[in-house]
Amino acid sequence: MQEILNNLKVFNSLKNYNFQRLHMPGHKGMEEIFPDGIKNAYPYFDVTETVYTDDLLNPQSYIKEFLESINSFFNSRYSFLSLQGSTHLLQSAIVAFSKPFGNILINRDAHKSIYNIARILRLDIEYIYPKYDSLLGIYTYIDEKELEEALKKTKSEIVIITSPSYYGINQDIKAISTLTKKYNKKLIVDQAHGGYYKFVGKETALDEGADICIISLHKTLPCPNQSALFLSNLEDNEKLNEMLACLHTTSPSYVLVLWSEYGIEFSKKFGEALYHELEKKLRELFLPILEYTNYRFKNIDILKLLFDFGKLGHDIEDIKMLLSRYFIVPEAIDQRRILFYFSIIDSFSNFENLKNFFYDIIKKKGKIQKKPFPLPPRPKKVLKIYEIDDYKKTRIKIKSADGFICAKAIIPYPPGYPVIAEGEVIDKDIIEYLEEVLGKDFIEENEVDVIDER
């Protein structure tokens, strides 16, 4: 057996992953928060649907009771546990409420899973562009007047809003839900990054008036990768239930189910206390660099920290060197910014290491970078996202793509949303924006799929 273990590529690559994990998933690899019964769940609990087990896709006994407790906790009419992440839940909701060749209204900085299902269902995407903060280079808040204008025009029956965003920006869901009800639209909120809210005493999008709220359990809670919850306040959820089961694997992992249940119960019991302890630590830790972070925004999700090290005169190589020295792995990094993701489990962490990391950045700061981030271009759409499937495609260097129609979205992390989507024209402004945010090497070394005719 040891000989087999010695030859395992994935196991031997990951067994020495001894870093400070400032990224997802939310359990942060802390074994001490899990009892032996959970840590040793595999293989004993790795069973399938039998006459003695409940079925995740058609629960009748203990999984049904588990979901009923979810409804009670979240004040929802219907819930569904997914082991395929928020991607599965978002796509299932869109399938349930959309017709092929219809329309869908989303915020531009939406998750790529929404773009993907729009292409499969042959939906024409309409965009709401949030305001843009050029000091930090992120989309922020949705303008209610612009949203109302979009609602007046759209043929879409649903509106999908991301809140909080990848960078922790919370939208005014109460105001947005008032508008969507006024125009008889169903409001689906992708609250994947705010999965911990209810567990620490905060309101979910469902509490604020959304019809459907989708949360990731694994991002900020001690739950396994792939675990997510679908929460609905609709009276009729029959079609939703059908689509959710239809698009989910028919072989769900009971190991992940029981781990998810443990993570939820752990968070119910300890979440609020752990969050308030963590909040205090974070606010003290980042006080010296507050003006260079997203913490300066109102109603921010503080478990997402975006830090503009460029404003302190550092370049990406400086920061990579420091990350390596302090054995820190962030969620993402680009030419000027670094993104850290915390979870309630980080309350158990010793932040001395991170404090020293930031001390070095402040101590060795260079020439202050005052240059604002460029405004993301709004590409011209010449084809609907699904129409690209009818054309021959080729791959070319991004730096040489001026004038071509994009055939595969460019979605760097950060910024975590399509800089350009399928069917849009790549122009000089797009290329210059990518170079500014991600560096000259990015556009010179990377290729993009384009339609092989102008």
Image: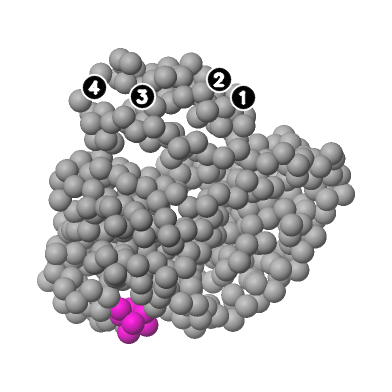
For the residue labelled by badge 1, is the local secondary structure a helix, a strand or a loop? helix
Q: What residue type is labelled 3?
A: Ile
Cα distance between the residues tagged 2 and 3:
18 Å
> Which residue shows up at 69% across the image and 67% down it?
282
Report crowding for label 4: few under 14, some 14 to 19, many 20 or more residues within 10 A (C-alpha): few
- Going by the numbered disc 1, the residue's amino acid type is Lys
Decide which of tag 3 and tag 1 comes sooner along the chain: 3
Distance, label 2 to label 1, CA atoms, is 6 Å
Could you tell me the amino acid type at mark 4?
A: Tyr
Residue behind mark 2: 444
Local secondary structure at mark 4:
loop
Displayed quadrant of residue 72: bottom left
Dots 3 and 1: beta carbons under 8 Å? no
N-terminal of the pair, mark 3 or mark 4, is 4
Q: In this view, does 212 lie to the left or right of 334?
A: left
| Residue at mark 4 | 391
Q: Badge 1: how crowded within 10 Å, few (<14), some, or many (20+)? A: some
